[in-house]
Amino acid sequence: MSKQDDVLVKVQAAQSLCSEDPERAEVCLRSALKDADALGQSSATLHLQLAELLFRLRRTRQALAEVSEALALDPFNLVALNLRQVLGRRLR
Amino acid sequence: MLSGAKLEALLGKLRRALEEREVEAAEKLFREVLAEAQRLGLASAYAHFVLAGALDRSGKLEMAFEEIKKAVDADPLALPVRHAFESVAARLRAALADPARAADDADVPRLYKLLVDAGQADLEAHLAMVRFAVATAQLDMARSLADAVTTLFPAAREAWETLARVARAQGDVAAAAKADAELAGAEVPVPLFGVTGKAEA
């Protein structure tokens, strides 16, 4: 299994944990992001996934930071743009 | 980072593309956004992903595959993109191996190359290409492929059957007999848990 596959396994684990155990899902996602970084890879989708999770946990500022990372990597991601709007409204 | 009026204009175009009911018009808008993004040095997995979805829904499976490959390249860690890639690849494989497709169908090499280049060709896809090579009298190519398929899938009886057929068509009786012998071996069912004979206390 390649190192990229290891990261994908963590992302998959986070996906299956996110409704029952969002805190553990967050740990998985952050670990996946760290591993991806070590591999020299960046993923708008991973940051967006973490942002959505943090949004559900009502950690708005952290979610906003993640969604900004996602948009820096892929400014055309309309899902991330919509989430940023929602988060902005929540902060006001 | 792209920002300001230029970005807003492109995002407006992307939203219009998503709302457009006319497939050709939507595709044109998506491609304009992607071309501009590319000119600015941006690779948007999202834009490629949504274009792939639009192409897929309009039945343009091969074009959808090209786009979803670009989305995977742009963001290899995106699970939704990977799932879409697997789904389109599976339907391309099914289209290539469709029993209703004539062996000498001119689309076969193109579909096969698409799958091979993406590392998505399976046994059926390789066999479809061998059948094409035989049907179009390219026996040397058929033989090379059939040999390779038996290396890749040594336990697959279809692989040995195909190699035997190709070797026979080439007049290579010895190779055909050898493939037949391997075929007989491949037909022996493998015990599920490695236990042969009757278990006794």
Image: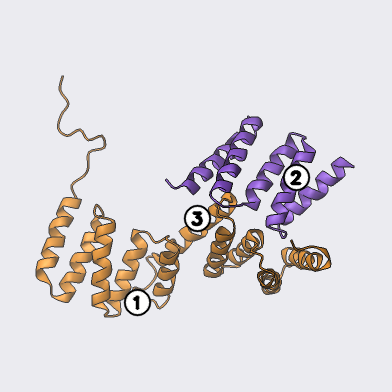
Chain colours: A purple, B orange
Task: Inspect the image, locate mark 2, and give the three-letter code of the amino acid beneath it.
Answer: Ala
Q: Position of residue A48 (x, y in %)?
A: 68, 47
Relative placement, left or right, of B102 versus B61 is: left
Q: Residue at x 46, y 64 (%)?
A: B92
**Quarter holding residue B165:** bottom left
Q: Secondary structure at mark 3?
A: helix
Quick one: quadrant of the C terminus of chain B?
top left
Relative placement, left or right, of B154 versus A56 is: left
Q: Nearer the viewer, residue B99 or B140?
A: B140
Query: Tag 3, which chain?
Result: B
User: Which residue bears the numbered disc 1?
Assistant: B104
Q: Which mark is residue A65?
A: 2
3D distance between C-alphas at marks 1 and 3: 27 Å
Relative placement, left or right, of B127 versus B43 is: left
User: Dot 3: within a 10 Å radius of its alpha carbon, few (fewer than 14), some, or many (20 or more) residues?
Assistant: some
Q: Nearer the viewer, residue A18 or B193?
A: A18
Q: Position of residue B76 (x, y in %)?
A: 55, 54
Q: Earlier in the sequence, mark 1 or mark 3?
A: 3
In front: mark 2 or mark 1? 2
Q: Which mark is residue B86?
A: 3
Q: Residue at x 67, y 74 (%)?
A: B24
Q: Nearer the viewer, residue A25 or B196?
A: A25
Q: Secondary structure at mark 1?
A: loop
Q: Nearer the viewer, residue B196 or A37?
A: A37
Quick one: quadrant of the N terminus of chain B?
bottom right
Question: Do marks 2 and 1 both belong to one polypeptide chain?
Answer: no
Question: Do marks 2 and 3 both belong to one polypeptide chain?
Answer: no
User: Dot 1: within a 10 Å radius of its alpha carbon, few (fewer than 14), some, or many (20 or more) residues?
Assistant: some
Q: Position of residue A88 (x, y in %)?
A: 84, 46
3D distance between C-alphas at marks 2 and 1: 56 Å
Q: Position of residue A17 (x, y in %)?
A: 60, 34
